[in-house]
Amino acid sequence: MTALKRKIRSACLYLFIPLLVIYACSTRSSEVNSKKVAEKKNNEKFDTRTEEKDAKFVVDNVSNIYGEISLSELAERHASDAEVKRVAAEVRKQYGTLLNQLKKYATAKAISIPTGESEKEKNKIDKLSSDKTFDKDWSNEFRDLNKETISNFENASTSLSDEELKSWVTASLPEIRKYHDKIMACNNRLK
């Protein structure tokens, strides 16, 4: 009987280990491409184009806001200019609030969202962290990313189908523009 138990344990072990490896690898790739994973889940989940379009807006902007928060945190650590650090801290705090509101909306509407910034943004952050002209390059990068966010919100304010989301976008735009103005002031001063 003990020989049979050993054979069963060995068979289970040989089956379990490959499954564990496959699971671990798939988990890592999901973390790396969380935006793509969220988009795929939403495409499978929603029946209509309008629902998919609203979900795509949420996914894209959760990812962008994560990127802006990460850039802000980077500036708080690496900037030499006191004004850049101050603006970055304000942006991180305000965009954290926006992110939490968007996450809450996504949860209520069963929209899958990314868990961080996109790979493109991660690469920019990595590059900036070793940049010799950090303050100037950071303000240029943040200005461009924030312009994209403003453009996305402006387009969404007229094209989204969900009234609750559209209302949130419209209410959030003035705050985003306010911080864009502060970033532009830093950018212009650092030229």
Image (cartoon, helix red, strand yellow):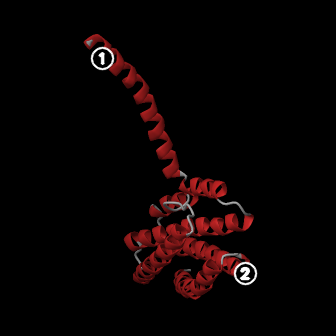
Q: Is residue 151 visible?
A: yes
Residue 158 circle label: 2
What's the residue type where badge 1 is placed? Lys
- Mark 1 and mark 2 residues within 8 Å of each other at the beta carbon: no
Residue at 58%, 85% (x, y): give it: 177
Q: Is residue 150 visible?
A: no
Q: Residue furthest left?
A: 2
Q: Is residue 56 left or right of residue 5?
A: right
Categorize mark 1 by other alpha carbons within 10 Å: few (<14), some (14-19), many (20+).
few
- Name the element at disc 2: helix
Q: Toward which corner of the image does residue 124 lie, by quadrant?
A: bottom right
- The percent position of residue 17, horizontal first and vertical second, equals 40, 29
Residue at 49 percent of width and 64 percent of height: 128
The amino acid pointed to by label 2 is Thr
State the image coordinates of residue 116 (x, y, percent, origin top left).
49, 61
N-term-proximal mark, 1 vs 2: 1
Between 106 and 74, the residue placed more toward the observer is 106
In the rendered image, the residue lying farthest to the front is 1
Q: Which residue is mark 1?
A: 5
In the image, taking residue 52 as reference, residue 108 lies left or right, namely left
Q: Residue 102's spot in the image, x, y percent?
A: 53, 73
For label 2, count other residues whose C-alpha is less than 10 Å away and answer few (under 14), some (14-19) or many (20+): few
Residue 101 vs 125, above or below: the answer is: below
Q: Nearer the viewer, mark 1 or mark 2?
A: 1
